[in-house]
Amino acid sequence: MTDFSVKPTLTGERVVLRPLGEDDYDTLMAAMADPDVIRFTGSRGEITEAEYREWLRTRKDQTDRLDLAIVEKATGETVGEAVLNEWSPEVESCGFRILVGPAGQNRGLGSEATRLIVSYAIEELGLHRVELGVYAFNPRAQRAYEKAGFVVEGIRRQALKWDGDRYDDVIMAVLAPEWKAAALRSEA
């Protein structure tokens, strides 16, 4: 693997992950305006429409990250995004983050999107490690990541200050050998 310049389309049973683009603006802005999404992602600050449209337009040109829209197959609607970022070619690792708006929540779409993109990172790109952080006040997401093969590695204590309270950031990762072993078990 040299970089993330190839922008694949990954197809599952219920979702399609495809390159993120400017056409996803309205759906993603609506998702990012949801109070739960804001809190779970620890989002801060505001971005103008022009800045965000430009950011979306340039996703296809990035070689150090992969930004994919999560599209529900049944409706064709974008419900979120799945991202591989913080790529480290030296250690064959990257970060992972996901955002699923209210329209796509509680139906397993995010879990399937997670499995698709992690599978791509490990099996197609040859990465050894995919890691993420999840805030301690989001145990539902932590359980979903564990089901996808992520293991808790540590805690960044009080890494987020939100509405005057401090919260831990739970660091999780999945390693290629673990991912491949889990895939073999699920096939048996």
Image: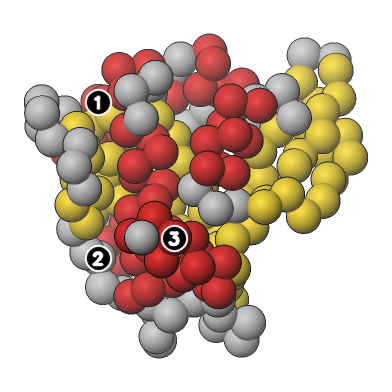
Q: Which residue is mark 3?
A: 185
Give coordinates of residue 64: x percent, y percent.
45, 71
Q: Label for residue 7?
A: 2
Front in this rendered view, residue 66 or 45: 66
Q: Residues within 10 Å of mark 2 (few under 14, many from 20)?
A: some
Closer to the N terminus: mark 3 or mark 1? Answer: 1
* Residue 31 makes an appearance in the image: no
Q: Which quadrant holds residue 2?
A: bottom left
Mark 1 residue type: Asp
Give coordinates of residue 57: x percent, y percent.
26, 51
Separation (CA) of disc 3 from disc 1: 40 Å
Task: Say if 96 sits above or below 7 in the image.
Answer: above
Closer to the N terminus: mark 2 or mark 1? Answer: 2
Q: Residues within 10 Å of mark 3 (few under 14, many from 20)?
A: few
Q: Label for residue 77?
A: none
Mark 2 residue type: Lys
Name the quarter where the C terminus is drawn.
Answer: bottom left
Front in this rendered view, residue 123 or 183: 183
Find numbered disc 2 in the image and state the secondary structure of the residue it sits on: loop
Separation (CA) of disc 2 from disc 1: 21 Å
- Seen at 59% across and 61% down, the residue is 174
Q: Which residue is mark 1?
A: 26
Give coordinates of residue 43: x percent, y percent.
59, 30
